[in-house]
Image (tube, helix red, strand yellow):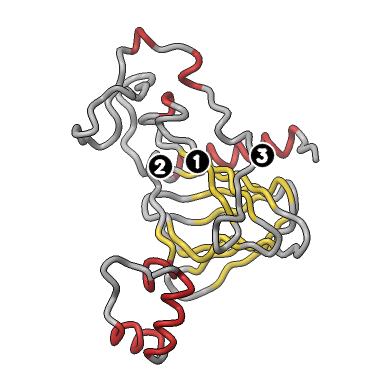
Amino acid sequence: MKISSKTIQLFLYSLALLLSLAKTDPPPLQDFCIADAASPSSFYSNGVPCINPNSAVSSHFVTSALAKPGKTSGNIFGFNATLTNTKNLPGVNTMGLTMARIDIAANGIVPPHTHPRASEVTICLKGALLVGFVDTLGRLFTQQLRPGDSFVFPKGLIHFLYNMDSSKPALVLSGLSSQNPGLQMTSMATFASKPPIPDEVLKKAFQITSQDVSIIRKNLGG
């Protein structure tokens, strides 16, 4: 399937607008800050240390990490997310940006989740998707996407992507407005945390029984 140049231009424009409005990460103090892969793992900072800018080369700003399809069969929900990071794209360091390729199997789902530090704009490249988010008033905003359609998920709100096709996989490309957007799966955080949330809390919160809690935990690997 071939995506038109206008579609790509629209996605890049939407991403640029999103990043200009949702400045999650602090702005860089220099043109770029190539991630130093040799920095000691015991060194912690709000970002990744830089190499000498005079050592920067073009290869620091390019990656093929999103070119290959991700394996969805090993995920209970039927999806795989491949992200850019400072290891596969050192030049992205301090840019306040993450790109993600999301492969979704037939009838697979990226279940309700949040990115606490980023807004997200998604473009459907292949397949038929149902996407949506819930705002803080409990309102659901949902839309069916076809190839070329884009959708924005506001920062920190619970959202999902579901492949409605029962026979064909779907593919989306997302841009997130942080170098470290974070990810919290609602179901996994609730029923598969370590240590587990007390059963009594879950029973009262979801109005379910102890048996229900055990079944859900088992299904999610908790």
In terms of image quadrants, where is residue 12? top right
Q: Which mark is residue 178?
A: 2
Mark 2: amino acid: Ser
Residue for badge 1: 83
Q: Residue furthest right?
A: 1
In which quadrant is the C terminus drawn?
bottom left
Q: Is residue 73 above or below residue 24?
A: below
Upstream in sequence: badge 1 or badge 3: 3
Residue for badge 3: 10
Disc 1/disc 3 C-alpha distance (Å): 21 Å
Disc 2/disc 3 C-alpha distance (Å): 20 Å
Residue appearing at x 37%, y 50% in the figure: 117
In terms of image quadrants, where is residue 106? bottom right
Residue 189 or 217: which is nearer the viewer? 217
Q: Where does residue 154 sit, x and y in percent of width and height?
A: 48, 56
Label 2: which secondary element: loop
Upstream in sequence: badge 1 or badge 2: 1
Residue 210 or 184: which is nearer the viewer? 210
Query: With 37 as the anchor, is 123 left or right in this view?
Result: right
Label 3: which secondary element: helix
Mark 3: amino acid: Leu
Mark 1: amino acid: Leu
